[in-house]
Image (spheres, rainbow, N blue to C red):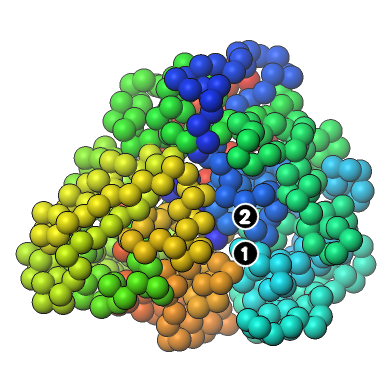
Amino acid sequence: MRVTKGAQIVAGTALLAIAVAACGGGASTGDSGTSADTPVRMELGEPQNLLVPSNTTESEGAEVLAAVFEPLVNYDENKEVVEAAAESITTEDNKVWTIKLKPGYTWHNGEPLIAQNYIDAWNYAANQDNAQGAGYFFGRVEGHADLNPGEGKQVTTKEMSGLKAVDDTTLQVTLTAPFSQFRTMLGYTAFYPLPKAAFGADGKVTNEYGEKPIGQGLFKLDKPYKKGTDQTIDLSIYDKYPAKKPSNWTKLQFKLYNSSETAYNDLQGDNVDIQDQLPASAIASAKTALGDRYTDQPDAGIGYIGFPLQYNDEYKDIKVREAISMAIDRKTIAETVFAGTRAPADDFINPAIAGYRQGACAACTYDPGKAKEQYAAAKGPAKLELGYNADGGHKEWIEAVANNLRANLGVEVTVKPFEKFANILDDLDAKKYKGMFRMGWAIDYPSPENYLTPIFSTGAITTGSNYAGYSNKEFDEAVAKGDQAATPEEGLKLYQQADDILIKDLPYIPVYFYRNNSGYSTKVKNVKINLLNQVEWADVEKA
């Protein structure tokens, strides 16, 4: 579940940045040059949490961890699963899965990667006592309930019965019920392993590890990252990484910003090398300004307006939510604010993924007359507040939505910017923020199920990205039936039934489908952004 900071996608992206004091007005932190030991520099927002895979559910932290860890699987250009750290992933019944690890992977401290590393990481993630943000992803594993007896109840075991190390290179996973998408989801951050060094004497992942995670991927951290203090995250290539490495550089630096516009100015001045999502204010002129260094490509993310349904009854009436949705002029926002690089959203599933149905969401159609009449009849609130993260380039489109609501509903609308994406997520987690909120989603894996379970299932309220606090038993059951379908085609129909329930309930309002609009400096080339909105670092070259 990758909530996306940026106004592109998805967290996130989210499938989504700390003002670099050194950057201030766009000052350089040094010429990247062509030297192999001078870093390639990427713009990034401040991660919400320490860098622990099972507690990283937003796009900024996920970008860093994707550089540090090798997932079990990746996805090709056709959205097909390809093995990465896994040699093979097999099943005969979609319930018992066997994962064989590819030889050659070692931890950055030199220890070999073994099956037990996955078991340790997944048990830690699933245990309710550890309060990990991605813990619900393990809800399908047999024994998950034993680690999650519920609030006020004591956990009496440390392991899920469905995890077994057959030998050092073979992991067997038994699910509570068949789930055809299990192999597909294994590319997600939550399923990264952890080394023995991650855990302290109390069995908890240490803060020291979260500041300088030891991974088994392409890059290792050069020094601990001190959240809230450091303005960069510095990494070097791990020499023993067994797969493809960059051809002419060895160091990577994530530069942290709290303004997409400041980052874009630095990009134009070659003071940062990669910005994976440009601010809305730059999109209209970016092609001219950057030329071939500007990229506009399909993206699987969705931009939403969310409602805190669990703790604000002002939005309880579906007629109010429908009216707000019908009052939003998605077409004009997509064409004007985003210069045609977004598409009006009319479903909870993005067109890039199988399962999308054009026009599925009737309440997503702009109808200001009906919106005003219905809002008045439902006695909607006279005052609305709309929160967003100011570090993701959202100001223009959020202001446009606010103006739509003012004009079409006749209400007072206050727009509330949060300095960082992490701040609004923290307030939503704590149930402190009671206004409507901007949210984005970047897919974790290419399945229609990924637009459903992580954001809207009941289980995702406490250990997921269900910031609305939405709960509908009928929806949960429909998703579960899709999970257990005998064929992908049957599963798709069942997931669409769950999608129909979301369309009826509108816990979020889909506003636009993303495209990825990114850019890079004159000092790099061959920059590719993958399906998960992450940079393919091994392909990047110094120019």
- Residue at point 82% right, 54% down? 198
Above or below: residue 532 compared with residue 55:
above
> Is residue 445 shown left or right of residue 297?
right
Say which residue appears at 29% left-offset and 30% top-offset. Answer: 284
Separation of marks 1 and 2 at Cα, in angstroms: 7 Å
Q: Quadrant of residue 60?
A: top right
Pick the quarter of the image with the C terminus.
top right
Q: Mark 1 touching mark 2, by CB under 8 A?
A: yes
Percent x, y for residue 313? 31, 76
Position of residue 233 measured from the top left corner of the image (x, y, whole percent): 66, 34
The residue labelled by disc 1 is: 134
Task: Using the rendered view, name the quadrant where residue 516 is placed.
Answer: top left
State which quadrant residue 126 falls in: bottom right
The answer to whether any part of residue 259 appears in the image is yes
Secondary structure beneath dot 1 equals loop
Task: Report the front residue among 125 and 167.
Answer: 125
| Relative to 345, 427 lies left or right | right
Quarter of the image with the N terminus is: bottom right
Amino acid at circle 2? Thr
Q: Counting residues from the N terminus, which is met first, the one under dot 1 or under dot 2?
A: 2
Label at residue 56: 2
Q: In the picture provided, is 199 more to the left or to the right than 399? A: right
The residue positioned 20% from the left and 68% from the top of the image is 381
Mark 2, Cα crowd under 10 Å, few <14 / some 14-19 / many 20+, is many
Q: Nearer the viewer, residue 28 or 414?
A: 414
